[in-house]
Amino acid sequence: MKLVFIGPPGVGKGTYAKAVSETFGIPHISTGDIFREEVKKGTELGKRVKEYLDRGLLVPDDLVIEVVRHRLLQEDCRRGYILDGFPRTIVQAEALERFSPPDWALLFHAEDSVILERLSGRRICARCGAIYHVKYMPPKIPGICDKCGGPLVQRRDDTPEVISERLKVYREQFTPIIAYYEGRGKLVRIEANEQADVVVPRVIAALKKLY
Ligand code: AP5
Ligand code: ZN
């Protein structure tokens, strides 16, 4: 099962990818999570990508491609992968097609107003990366992760200015990516306006039909 999840920031890609990963036992690989982790650890890679993340701009293709290529060589990817946030450019899509072509590209859609509300209320666990929403997916104890007890924080790029830059970058980059997968007969559109308890079963049902 080789899948790419595409769609605007905040549509819920990470949320759905985690659920699909648990259901089918396929690793969830988020390029955004990988970069945020490197920034947190202060590695060489982290230092190179920090500025892009903080401004909501795309990290250069060669860097991203190398990170993904390397990750997909790992043992746990033998049965497949769920790539969340990659590819974002045609150069990335073509590179992926060369080293491990996906079976399907799932494209998620939600209205702009829904996306803005999701991003402004998002909290993530600083320890394990679990995703919450203050209103829609709240933790049992405010500010504390249900899974590991870690503190919940807001992502640095979830400020109004950076959100609007990320949406702009998405609009500029994604038309060709969508056309790329549509032209290859690999595009599956998923409506994601509703709550996660509606969208997650929808994604799983769509995948059960495809496999
Ligand atoms: P990345 O981490 O990929 O961010 P993004 O694409 O902006 O996507 P998000 O993680 O913001 O949203 P999501 O769709 O996963 O939503 P989530 O599930 O969290 O990228 C960050 C940066 O890294 C980029 O700006 C760039 O600099 C760099 N980068 C990464 N990949 C790159 C690449 N390939 N090339 C170049 N640069 C790259 O959900 C959002 C919120 O909504 C949560 O609070 C959640 O609880 C809630 N929620 C989710 N679904 C629902 C629902 N159905 N109903 C109600 N609430 C919901
Ligand atoms: Zn946690």
Image (spheres, helix red, strand yellow):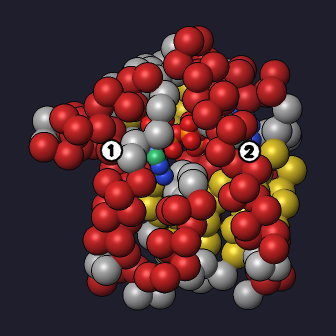
Residue 32, percent from left and from top? 43, 45
Task: Categorize mark 2 by other alpha carbons within 10 Å: few (<14), some (14-19), many (20+).
Answer: some
Quarter that holds the N terminus: bottom right
Whether residue 33 is visible here, answered yes or no, is no
User: Does label 1 point to a residue whose CB lies under 8 Å from ligand 1?
Assistant: yes
Residue highlighted by disc 1: 35
Q: Is residue 40 above or below residue 205?
A: above
Query: Residue 206 vs residue 12: left or right?
Result: right
Q: CA distance from mark 1 to mark 2?
A: 25 Å
> Looking at this view, is 180 or 23 the one in front?
180
Query: Residue 190 vs residue 53: left or right?
Result: right
The label nearer to you, 1 versus 2, is: 1
> Looking at this view, is 122 or 148 the one in front?
122
* Residue occupying the point 19% across, 35% down: 47
* Residue occupying the point 50% across, 62% down: 92
Question: Of the numbered discs in the image, which one, if any, rests on residue 15?
Answer: none
Amino acid carrying mark 1 in the image: Phe
Residue highlighted by disc 2: 196
Image quarter for residue 144?
Answer: top left
Amino acid carrying mark 2 in the image: Ala
Report helix, strand or loop for mark 1. Answer: helix
Query: Residue 150 vs residue 138: left or right?
Result: left
Q: Is residue 29 above or below residue 49?
A: below
